[in-house]
Amino acid sequence: MSLQCGIVGLPNVGKSTLFNCLSNAKAQAANFPFCTIEPNVGVITVPDERLNKLVEMEHPASVVPATVEIVDIAGLVKGASKGEGLGNKFLADIRNTDAIIHVLRCFDDDNITHVDGTVDPVRDKLTIDLELQFKDLETIENRYEKEQKKARVGGDAKSKKLIEVMELYRDALLGGKSARTVALDETQQEAARDLMLLTAKPVLYVCNVDEASVVNGNAYVEQVRQAVKDENAEVLVIGAAIEADIAELETYEEKQLFLEDLGLHESGVARLIKAAYKLLNLQTFLTAGPKECRAWTFRKGMKAPQTAGIIHSDFERGFIRAEVIKYADYVALGSEARCREAGKIAIEGKDYVVQDGDIMHFRFNV
C-alpha cells in the first residue's frame, strides 16, 4: 500500500538530518539552503512490538514488517507559491504525498544559519502555511469558473457540490486558515478529494530540539503547541542531532543505554515512524506461523474481503470467510491450535471491519 508522508519545512531546520535517521537513504545534510533538490524517498520499517512477540513465539523462517514511505522535500521559502526558490517543483512534490510532517526548528545554535536570521518556529510555520494556502487559493480560483459553467449549463450535481466545498475552503483560506480546519460532511469530503489541496492534507508537527529539551521540551515547543491547538494535529518533540548519534551506534543494547541516559524509553525516530503510520490512517493486521510472521498494512475501516485482497487479489475475489484471533488471546494461549481449542477463533464474514492487531486467516475459493 504505497502511501507517503512528505517532510517539509524551511531550509536548515533539520529535515534531511531527520530523514537520514529514518532511512538508509543518504540525503545530503549541509548548512546551506536547497541542499536537497530532488525529493529523497525512504521506505521505512514500522516498529511493532506485537510482531516481535509473534516472532519470539513462532521462530519463523521469514519475518516481514510493515513499512511506510517518507519523502524528504527541499526547504520552502517565502514566495514559493510564486515560483521563488524552485517553489513550483517543491509544491508539486508536496501535492504528490498523502500527509505532511512539518519540521520546525526549536533550538538555538549560532553555528547553524537560519534562513530568516532568528529562531521563531511559529513564524516559520506561518511562512510555510501561507505559501501552501496561496497555492490552494490559486487552485480554487482556476477551478471555480469551470465548475460554475458546468453547473449552470448542464445542471451538473457533482459540480454544484464541488462549488459548495470550494466556497467553504476559499473563505477559510482568505481568513488565513488551512483547508484541513474546515468541517465537511461525508458528501462534501468526497467532492473535496478531487481538489487535492495542499492544506487539506493531515499534518504532524515535529519540533526539532537540542539535547537538553528532548524529554520535557522548551519554550519554543510550547509556542508551537499554542499555535496549533485548534488544528487537531499532533506535536512530536525530537532531537534530530541526538537521533543521528543514536543511528551511529551498532547494537540495540548500546542504543537503549544511550536512550536511558537521556531519560527516554523509545527513540524519537521510532515514535515518528509510528506517528506517520497513524497520520496516514493506516493500521496493521498480522499473519503468523512457522514459515512466516508478517505485518500487513491496511487503511483503517477496511472490511475483511478488502484486506484479504492485500495478500492476493484471488483472496478477495473468492472470499468465503475470515478466521480472526485477537492478538491478546494468541499471546495468552500460545498458538493458533490452542486458540482453536479454546474457542478463541472468530468466524467473520464480508461485513467484518478488520481491527488493528487482528491475526487473520482467510478462506477463499476461485
Image (spheres, rainbow, N blue to C red):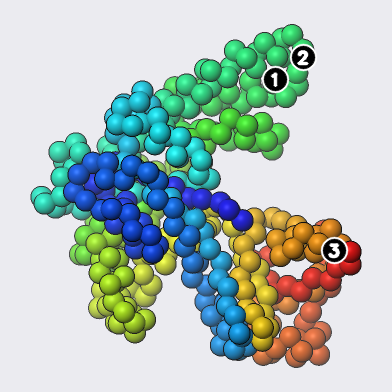
Decide if residue 332 is in sight here: no
Q: Quadrant of the N terminus?
A: bottom right
The answer to whether residue 345 is left or right of residue 333 is right
Q: Are marks 1 and 2 in contact (CB under 8 Å)?
A: yes
**Residue 351 visible in rendering:** yes
* Label 1 crowd (10 A; few <14 / some 14-19 / many >=20): some
Q: Neighbour class for label 2 at 10 Å: few (<14), some, many (≥20)?
A: few
3D distance between C-alphas at marks 1 and 3: 39 Å
Q: Earlier in the sequence, mark 1 or mark 2?
A: 2
Name the image quarter holding residue 32. Answer: top left
**Which is closer to the viewer, label 3 or label 2?**
3
Residue name at image x 62 percent, y 35 percent: 193
The kind of secondary structure element at disc 1 is helix
Q: Residues within 10 Å of mark 3 (few under 14, many from 20)?
A: many
What x and y, as percent, mark residue 134? 41, 25
Q: Is residue 242 above or below residue 227?
A: below
Q: Which mark is residue 155?
A: 2
| Residue 31 as seen in the image, left or right of residue 143 | left
Dot label at residue 319: 3
User: Is 42 situated left or right of 309 in this image?
Assistant: left
Q: What residue type is disc 3 on?
A: Phe
Residue at 25% in and 53% down: 29
